[in-house]
Image: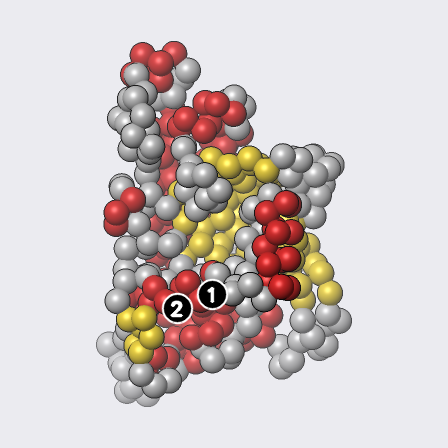
Amino acid sequence: MADAEGVPPPPGPPPFLDARQVQRLCEQGHLALDLPTHLAEAYQAVSDDLKEFFTLSAEEKALLYPSRSADTEQGYVRVDGEKEFITLRYLPQRSVADDGSDPISEDHRAEKGWPKTETMEKRLSQTWSDTAVLLLRILADIAAALEIHPRAWDTLTEGSLALPDRREVASPSLLRLFRYEPQGGTAEAHTDLGLLTLCVCRGPGLQVFERQAQGTGQGDVPPGWRDAADATLLVGDTLRVLSSNRMRAGRHRVQATAGGRHSAVFGLRASTRGEIDLSLFGGHGAVDARQFWDALRGSRVNVNWDKDRRDAFRAKMRAGAGV
């Protein structure tokens, strides 16, 4: 159907973000979001699940969501004095532990009340899919504003739009569920690696860095740290690089609070399969997706490592030891 001027409407769904919101996202790298009702309700249910899950013993949590040594990209991790969290890039296969050890018996799982995790994981799977769809829609708004090819995200989001059921098909995208300890739960200032990150918080502590505003129509805002909204969208370094720095990465941190906090973080990251066609972003040529990811990831401190490992990595960087 054409409008009153006889001009057909643009193809595709209406934008989720308006022009001012996209501009703010480009300038600041972060944006407070009003989540769709179904997604806000889903994250509230996830928060309720987490409160119950984190009451389990450390042994039970680690058995439910095993992690590999020194790996924060899958499974349960505890950083003493700071936080504990589950990272999901794929659903664990619990018939046999990840290291190939003895199967976890059904009787033992029933004794510990673990069948409840099936309900939690169904909810997490649906929340993953709904969040990925939302972020993909926002990427379409960004593409329109920056004149990026509308199909530029197709290969980048391959394997990320649903929670994978096994490791072999997982992408770098993740859903990370935190419990920060009272008085001790922090994360130093950093930017994320991926395309876009959605942070949904229960309780204060997350802060975003407000840069000097330009052209927002709201006057100058002095730079500095500000408390983040309950639902905050962050631009990651992958999107910053692919947009040729037309978008800034969202700098953020977590401050300790008296009561601690829970949060859910969904990171939509670029696929590591094949090549990234830079011409779709206004550039030239192509780059190997795995090499692109490794270069971004290998040059920075992981704020979810424990303090000793973070300090050791920084020392290695300062020494120029091939990092």
Residue found 37% across the figure and 46% down from its top: 89
Foreground: 65 or 267?
A: 65
Q: Position of residue 183 (x, y in %)?
A: 73, 37
Callout 1: SS = helix
Q: Amino acid at mark 2?
A: Phe
Q: Which residue is mark 1?
A: 296
Q: Position of residue 187 (x, y in %)?
A: 63, 49
Quick one: quadrant of the N terminus? bottom left
Residue found 41% across the figure and 71% down from its top: 141
Tell me the quarter of the picture where residue 228 sits. bottom right
Q: Position of residue 76 (x, y in %)?
A: 47, 35
Answer above or below: position of 149 versus 45: below
Residue found 29% across the figure and 16% down from its top: 106
Q: Position of residue 193 (x, y in %)?
A: 48, 61
Foreground: 300 or 44?
A: 300
Answer above or below: position of 98 versus 247: above
Callouts 1 and 2 close, C-beta under 8 Å: yes
Q: Amino acid at mark 1?
A: Leu
Residue 50 visible in the current orientation: yes
Q: Which residue is mark 2?
A: 292
Answer above or below: position of 188 versus 216: above
239 to the left or right of 171? right
Q: How is the image coloured?
A: secondary structure
263 to the left or right of 95? right
250 to the left or right of 71? right
Callout 2: SS = helix
Distance in Å between CA atoms under marks 1 and 2: 6 Å
107 to the left or right of 308? left
